[in-house]
Image: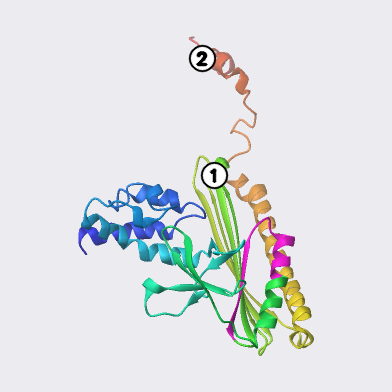
Amino acid sequence: MNQDDERIAAASSFILQSPPGEINDVLHDVRVIVNGVRSAEEVLPGDHSSVQWTDPQEEKLAQGILPALRDYNLTQFITVDVPGTSHQTIVSDIARIPSNDEDQERFLDPRSKTSFKFDHLSLEATDSRPAELDVDAEPLRAALESSTLSYLAAHYRSGVVAVFSVQPPSQFIVQIVANKYNPSNYWSGRWRSQYHIDFDSQTIRGKVLVNVHYYEQGNVQLETSHDLTIPIPPAVANAEPSSASSKILALIDIEESRLQRSFNDAYHEMAEKTFKGLRRALPLTRQKIDWDKVLGYKLGAELTAGKGVFTTS
């Protein structure tokens, strides 16, 4: 591996480990490693085609991080404004329309029934085109989408939903992502959940991933995942689309609420026991220090008066 490959590998590793909402900052910090990227503003946001590279070698290095950016965006459920609409959709492997040419890679937005190109550098969608969805699966897919949007509005401050038919007409995937970035208070977080709903086997297989980064006077990250399997009652599986979808989201609500409560219990346990076990509540003297009087202490005199170890015979 030559020096250029080593720098690209190092920069790619940093990119893939970027905390939620901090990819710009990571790119800014690795610009020294990848010389072609002189500042984050040249890459995100903005049109990368307008970047003025200093020489072909630097352009090669900068292009070397594109695969890592693509993997990051797809894994992290990056959201994008859908051209010609007022909503966002999720960019993910499930949304990707199969193609042998990555340069012509397109993604599906089932909600607007369109496909688009996505620039992994500028995070922009372009070239929107109509897309055909499976006619037999669409009533149930649309009902699941409507119920998921209602669920999102009831339980998330903000978020984005995408519902796909993966093996029509009986299998669907529901994706939810919610981001909260608060750099002024030094924290960020992302909730991702994906549910594979199979009406044939009457099961829901889900995965929830939570990432939180807190970095005020330190650097603490939480990364956790939770796999779950939910049986679909036969009455629900055979119900009309609107009824089945609302009841399926009610089942998901139960599981996600249980997971949220487990997080709250874990944080309470950490605050009350784990963190307190890392330090003493009182010094060895078992007495609190009056910090307001620290500067006025006459340590030598007090030691002499209290112990007499410095007195002469």
Residue 52 visible at all: yes
**Which residue sits at x=39%, y=53%?**
43
Please provide percent x and percent y for residue 97. Answer: 48, 78
Outermost residue toward the bottom?
200
Please provide percent x and percent y for residue 102. Answer: 38, 73
Kind of residue sitting beneath label 1: Pro
Classify residue 60 by image quadrant.
bottom left
Look at the image and say whether residue 149 sits in the magenta stretch. yes
**Which residue sits at x=40%, y=55%?**
47
First to last magenta residue range: 148-167
Which of marks 2 and 1 precedes in the sequence? Answer: 1
- Tell me the SS state at disc 2: helix
- Tell me the SS state at disc 1: helix
Side of 106 where 54 appears, left or right: left
Q: How many marks?
A: 2
Q: Nearer the viewer, residue 207 or 124?
A: 124
Q: Are there few (<14), some (14-19), or many (20+) residues within 10 Å of tag 1? A: few
Q: Are marks 1 and 2 in contact (CB under 8 Å)?
A: no
Outermost residue toward the top?
313
- The correct choice, above or below, for 135 with respect to 290 in the image is below
Please provide percent x and percent y for residue 195. Answer: 62, 75
The residue where tag 2 is placed is 300
- The correct choice, above or below, for 33 with respect to 166 in the image is above
Look at the image and say whether residue 277 sits in the magenta stretch. no
- For the residues labelled 1 and 2, the Cα–Cα distance comes to 47 Å
Q: Nearer the viewer, residue 167 or 186?
A: 167
Q: Are there few (<14), some (14-19), or many (20+) residues within 10 Å of tag 2? A: few
Kind of residue sitting beneath label 2: Gly
**Which residue sits at x=40%, y=47%?**
41
The residue where tag 1 is placed is 183
Please provide percent x and percent y for residue 75. Answer: 49, 67
